[in-house]
Every structure is written in structure tokens, then in C-alpha cells.
Amino acid sequence: MDLVKLLAVLAIIIIALKFKLKLWQAIIVGIASTVPLWQIPIAECGRLIIKATTSWSTISTCLVIYVITMLQKLLEERRQLKLAQEDLNGLFNNRRINGTVAPMIIGLLPSSAATMMCGELVEDAVKDDLDKDTKSFVTSYFRHIPESFLPTYPAILIMSQLSGVAIKDFVLGMLPLVCAMFAIGWFCYIRPNVGSETGMPESTDKKRDAVNLLKHLWPLIAIIVLVLVCGMNTLLAAGIVTALVYVVYRFRLSELPRILVKAFEVNLILSTYLCLVFKEFISFTGVIKKLPEMLGALPIPMDLIFGIIFFIGSLVVGSTAIVSICTSIAFTACPAIGWPFMVMLHSYVYAAMQFSPTHVCLFVATDYFGSSFGGIVKKTFKPVGIFMVVILVYYLLLTRVIL
């Protein structure tokens, strides 16, 4: 019964989005629907809202989004992203590369606000070769490829810690799937539809173009180095780099109030906050913890049942929540599989997040291009469906060879 309720809540959110409600409005509807379905007392609802609101995880996530958005606005003011696009043109002189590799570079930043930067680069690269729904998909899909394997993202760090799998083993195990992701997106939408010609002459100094690309993207590279190499949290790293950008590019004090206001993307921050509140409500119901028992009767091996659980759970509560709740349960039930199990589970988490109505980045992309959630989901079915089959085949091959 709890599984039916869970699917009903997900359906309610999707229907609300279908009626053109904004993400934050649809999430409110989803939260409201959990109250009668699980008979949550009103006093408990208040406690859950306060818990989510005062959690440092919620506060820091919203602050990171604001700071990264401010960084984007500062870079836009000084045309740094536009210049980086020109550098890519000089290096490759290929619009297909610009529309795929550039979002992956920006995707190294673990923030949904970075999706807006990717949207601008994709728009410039593909021009009118793709419709707005496909542009939204391309922006989100290629931007998230680094999120599938880089340890700058919370879900990977949490899963590694709870499972005992070394990050190095996981990253190496993911590399074939990362190549598969890129190839699937490339051959589904980029290669058949986007021309390669930029209309620009070939560069005569590619070394200079490479150096200039680093110069124009140094703020993003600096954040990644601070997070990965120095172990700094994303909020502090983004804050330091944003302050440096303000100084290096000689912004006037009079420009600051306007940029501070522009950086406050109400829909983005409100949607993120409410997704985290929704996660608290779903976690309170205990339905995610019951999924192994509910699906255990299926004639499927237990490790693959957990793949289904991680996929469904990510659709409903997001990647970090499902990883936090179910990783220990999964590795207790299947202790001998090791890093191939983590590769499979996280890959299904990644696949589910490309459809999830709790995934804020999807709505950032659709807002940027004026498309819809339904439109981006339709474009996602084919490539992500293929990828899910590749995950299963790769996992079965790994377990045959290693175990």
C-alpha cells in the first residue's frame, strides 16, 4: 500500500507540472498530498518544515545556488563565457563539440545554477538546429555527465562512505559508462541534427586558444581545485572565487547592488528549498526503508532489486536522500559485490535523476529555453533508456568477470 501511495504522490507532482505549475508550486502540492495519504499530524508537519528549514544542509545548498548564480552574472557582465565559447571555436572549430564539451566543463561545478551557464553555451552552439525541448535536454544531459562519477557531488561521497567502496575504484569503474553516456547523447541528437561548421576560419594558434580558454574559465577551474584538491566545501570555495572575480575584473561598488538582485533567482532557490522539505516528509513516512521488503517478493536477484529501489527512490526524493537512506541496507544485503555494485546503483540513481520532478536542474534548463518538463522528459526517454540497458549489461559483465 505504501508503494501505491508513493507512486500516487509522484503522479500528483507530474500532473501538477503538466498543468503548467512551476516546480515549487508542484512540490507544495506533493507535500500537501503526503499529509492525508500517511495521516501526518499537523503538529508533525510543522516540525518537519522547521527541521528542513533550519538544517545546515538546506541553508548551505540555497546559499551555494545564490553564490554560483552571482558568479555567473559577474562572468556574463565581463563576457567571459562568451569568450570561452570563442576559444572552443578556435580549438575545435566545431559546433557539435561546443554544444557538448562546454556543458560538461561547466558541469564540473556541483550547483544547479551552473545549468544556466550551460544553456547559454548550448544556445550559441546549436543555434536553430535543435528545437527548444531538445536544447533543454542537451543542456541538462551533457552538463550532468561529470555528476555521474566525480567525487565533488554529495551522493557519491555519501555512498562511498556508507558502502566502504574506495572512490578511486568507483571512478575507474565508471569510466566506460561515462564514455557510453557521451556517445549515446551524441548519436541520438547531436550527430544527426547539429552541423559541425561554425562559419569561422581555422585558428592559426591553437596553443593561444587553449591558454585563453583557461583564462576565461579560471573561476570554474579554481572552484574545482579548491573542492577536489584542497578539500574545501563548495560554498566556501564559490564564495572565495566570486570575491576574487569581483576584484580581478574591477567591478565598481555601484554595480554590486544590481548584481546582488539579479543573482537572486526566486524560482530556483524556492524550488530547491521545497524539494528539501519534501524529502523530509517522504523520509518521515518510512516508505523508502520499506522498499526492499515490498519488492523482495519479485523473482529478481536481490542486487537488481536494489537497482530498482535506487531508481524509484531517486525519482521521488532525489539522489542524496535515497543514497543516504538505502546504501547501508543494500551493502548489508549484498556485501560481496563491492565496487561493481556501487557503480550499478549510482548509475541508476543518475539515470533516474534525468527524469525526476525533484531535479531542479531540469527546470532551470526548461525555464532558460522556454520549454516544458514534459518536453524534456520525452527527449530523455530514448537516450536514458538505452543507457539503462548499457548499465545492466556492463554490471552483469563485471560480476561475471570479477566475482
Image: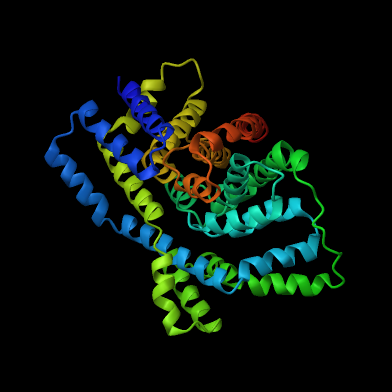
48 lies above or below 225: above
- The residue sitting at 48% across, 28% down in the picture is 308
- The residue sitting at 50% across, 29% down in the picture is 303
Quadrant in which the N terminus is drawn: top left
Q: Position of residue 334 (x, y in %)?
A: 47, 32
Which residue reaches farthest left?
43
- The residue sitting at 37% across, 48% down in the picture is 271
90 lies above or below 126: below
Question: Foreground residue, 285 or 356?
Answer: 356
- The residue sitting at 65% across, 32% down in the picture is 390
- Residue 344 falls in image quadrant: top right
Q: Position of residue 346 (x, y in %)?
A: 52, 41
For this view, does 104 lie left or right of residue 21? right
218 lies above or below 60: below
Visible in this render: residue 233?
no
For this view, does 80 lie left or right of residue 318? right
Visible in this render: residue 359?
yes
Q: Position of residue 246 (x, y in %)?
A: 49, 79
Question: Foreground residue, 22 or 156?
Answer: 22
Quadrant in which the C terminus is drawn: top right
223 lies above or below 347: below
Question: Foreground residue, 168 or 189?
Answer: 189
